[in-house]
Image (spheres, rainbow, N blue to C red):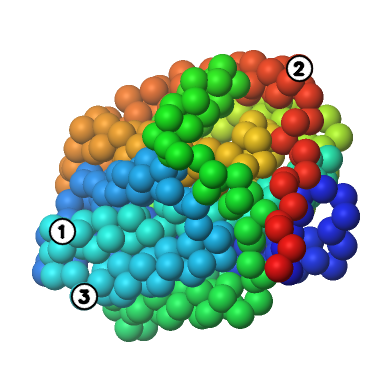
Amino acid sequence: MTIHSDDSGSTKQERAVVYLMAGVQFVNVLDFMMVNPLGPQLAEDPSMRVPASQLPLVMGSYTAAASVTGVLGSLFLERFDRRSALVVTLVGLAVGTAMGGLAQGLTSLIVARVVAGLFGGPATSLAFAIVSDAIPSRRRGWGMGIVMGGFAVASVLGVPAGLNLAKLGGWRTPFWGVAALIAIAAIAALRLLPPLRAPLERATADPSPVSSLVAIVKKPVVALSLAMTALTMTSVFIVIPNIPAFVQFNLGFQHLDLLYLLGGIMSFATTRVVGPQVDRFGSTRVAFAASALVVVIVYMWFVAEVSAVPVLVVSTLFFLAMSARGVSYNTLTSKVPEPHERARFQSVQSAVQHAASAAAAFASAQLLSEGPDHRLLHVARAGIVSIVLVAFVPVLMTLVERQVRRRGSTTDRPPPAEPAA
């Protein structure tokens, strides 16, 4: 059974693949997201010795490792059946996550997150490549909206559940619980996902993956898309790793589980609504509106430190803006590569995403310092940098979308048929 990226695939088959990849995205995003809300507990645990101002290093270590495997994956992922590769990455991710529950200090926690990142980055690339193979361009906003809904569900159910597990059994418990969920996702992908070999035949005929990678990256639309990716991630990861510590230690808000619950509900609703709007109006228009909202929120919170608006209102709007921006961004980038280049392109894109996120997280740790009672100092500096970068994202998206439209729908040509047995 093979999935083709033309219109011949049945709606039932498309939905099965999309919802399975949404489940993979759920466990992958949950693994990435759960560490940040646990930051205040790590800072308060004397055995871990993790200063609040250094918490971005934990997230940055994951994304830095994911960027490395993103580059490596771009050289060989196209040569493997997508299902097999996805299962291997999920197993590795489960092992790395379980290691986090055994950490005995900042160094061992960073090592565990590096292992998780080495496998988590390629898992994301493969999930998006599989959806791009399965769903034609004109309906891809719908598909990406559902897969991005995995982020929302991770916020609605996963993160609050993890925070409450941490309250009952300590901060280590969520690591082991998420590792078990990832293992279940690996089994589901192995048993339910059909072999995905359509792009494989052309990729294996390529004698030099390095030269092919260089040829892909040299394409103007790809280079511009990767620059957009770097700016998109850097612009918000200057502030995102600090949000839990900021709202708890600076703003005195203690209900992080409620914050992520409401934010996740808003994200889920947003992804379902925004996906069809991106198909109708284009990625750029949606991204302009979402980016403007991000700018307003970052200014209110980190620069002006407005306290009149409740924390839950601001945080929920932030989740809305980030979800809308994410759907528009992922839909647009899914149209950049040719069908046989998708896994390789997604790997390069994943490398750029994670490298930019890591650089922003590390820079954030340098911009901030810790005051009394773990209070974060100099947050306005991080906020200003974020605002300036966010403002330029829609500009690059406009340029990428114009090139994609000018080139036409070449990304939706049917892939080469498999040879008869």
Instruction: Kindly check if marks 3 and 2 are in contact, taking CB atoms under 8 A apart as contact.
Output: no
Q: Nearer the viewer, mark 2 or mark 1?
A: 2
Give the labeled residue for mark 2. Answer: 406
User: Residue 382's quadrant in the figure?
Assistant: top left
- Name the residue located 48 percent from the left edge and 32 percent from the top edge: 212
Q: Amino acid at mark 3?
A: Leu
| Front position in the image: 68 or 203 | 203
Would residue 362 appear left or right of 18 to someone viewing this image?
Answer: left
Locate the C terminus and report the quarter of the image it occupies.
Answer: bottom right
Indicate which disc, 3 or 2, sits on the residue closer to the N terminus: 3
Q: Position of residue 339 (x, y in %)?
A: 66, 41
Q: Secondary structure beneath disc 3?
A: loop
Give the labeled residue for mark 1. Answer: 106
| Front position in the image: 90 or 2 | 2
User: Residue 408's quadrant in the figure?
Assistant: top right
Indicate which disc, 2 or 1, sits on the residue closer to the N terminus: 1
Give the labeled residue for mark 3. Answer: 102
Disc 2: CA contacts within 10 A as few (<14), some (14-19) or many (>=20)? few
Q: Amino acid at mark 2?
A: Arg
